Amino acid sequence: MRTENQIQSKINELTLQRRALESRLTPLEENSPQQDNLKAQLTRLEDMLMMLEWVMNAPVGKYHA
């Protein structure tokens, strides 16, 4: 099990990676293979971020217990 600090560090790392990908994506030609590849990487990063944020802020309540 990861500590809260480890999870937050990973969130910060992935956020920096996402910003770097977004900056590389902006000047590319629309629908180019490179742009498609970067978009796929961005989608994976966003999925990982969403999961880590869910872990940090796990839902509570009778349904989720």
Image (cartoon, rainbow, N blue to C red):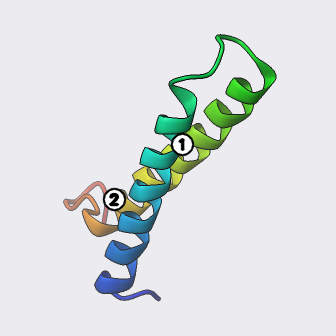
At x 43% / y 54%, what residue is drawn? 49
Instruction: Tell me how far mark 1 sits from mark 2, CA to CA.
Output: 20 Å
x and y percentages locating residue 26 in the rendered image: 50, 25
Q: Quadrant of residue 31?
A: top right
Q: Is residue 28 above or below residue 1?
A: above
- The local secondary structure at tag 1 comes to helix
Q: Is residue 60 left or right of residue 49?
A: left
Work out which quarter of the rendered image holds the C terminus and state it: bottom left
Seen in the image, is 41 located left or right of residue 33?
A: left
Q: Secondary structure at mark 2?
A: helix
Crowd tier of the residue under label 2, counting other residues whose Cα lies within 10 Å: few below 14, some 14–19, many 20 or above: some
Q: Mark number for residue 21?
A: 1
Name which of mark 1 and mark 2 comes first in the sequence.
Answer: 1
Q: Position of residue 61 (x, y in %)?
A: 19, 59
Residue 13 spot, x, y in % from top left: 43, 67
What's the mark number on residue 53?
Answer: 2
